[in-house]
Image: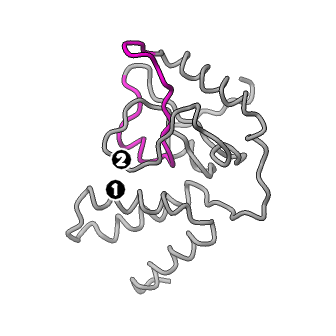
Amino acid sequence: LERALFFHSLEEALGDSVRAIAFSRRRFDLALPHHTLGEWKAPHFDEERTALVFGRESNGLTREELLRCSALCSIPVVEGVSYNLGMAVAIALHELVQKEEHFSPRSREAKELPLLSEQEALFHWIEEKIEAGDLRGDQRRAIRQLVQRMEPSRNELRTLFALFKSINGEK
């Protein structure tokens, strides 16, 4: 706990992560990749900056918080059984430690993933540009989910951002 960091917002906490895995039983109608804890395999946890996101004890993660994550993971339970937050974290960490070999950083031959803060900058820019337009909330969520499913490299995300700015006449 000596090295624990405290943040004022989820966005701030995820800023230097390349992937965020939300642990929640609530799925809403999101198109996030979803797996149960036992199904996770490399490369899901092989980045050194993968964030594990757990919700509040009282009501879990909100829809907006889930949208900030790259994927959704649920812990299988027997019907009628519910884990409190501490139990869920302990089970998830135990399972992940059992797959310790998946925590080693993968070869840098593979694409370098963008930081979540870089993805958020693109999403915020897009939302600013379409505020006056006719885009509905569900279409905005679709853009976010599309970019997350694409899993662009850091360079690809920067190129996409530059392209959008160029189309908009910005530098």
User: How would you rate the neighbour count of disc 2 (Cα within 10 Å): few for under 14, some for 14-19, many for 20 or more?
Assistant: some
Looking at the image, do the residues carrying marks 2 and 1 touch, with CB atoms under 8 Å apart?
Answer: yes
Question: Which element type, helix, strand or loop, lies under badge 2?
Answer: loop
Count neighbours of disc 1 (C-alpha within 10 A) and say few if under 14, some if 14 to 19, many if 20 or more: some
Residue displayed at 79% across by 44% down = 104
State the residue in front, 54 or 100: 100
Please tell me which residue lies in front, 129 or 158. Answer: 158
Q: Classify residue 57 as left or right of residue 103.
A: left
* Residue 116 on image: x %, y %: 56, 54
Q: Does the rendering let one see residue 30?
A: yes
Q: Magenta stretch: residue 63 in it?
A: yes
Q: Determine whether the residue tagged by mark 1 lies in a helix, strand or loop.
A: helix
Q: Is residue 147 magenta?
A: no
Hey, which residue is sitting farthest left in the picture?
A: 134
Q: Which residue range is magenta in the image?
A: 59-82
Q: Is residue 99 above or below residue 144?
A: above
Query: How far from the left and from the top, in percent, is residue 73?
Result: 50, 36
Question: Which residue is tagged 1?
Answer: 141
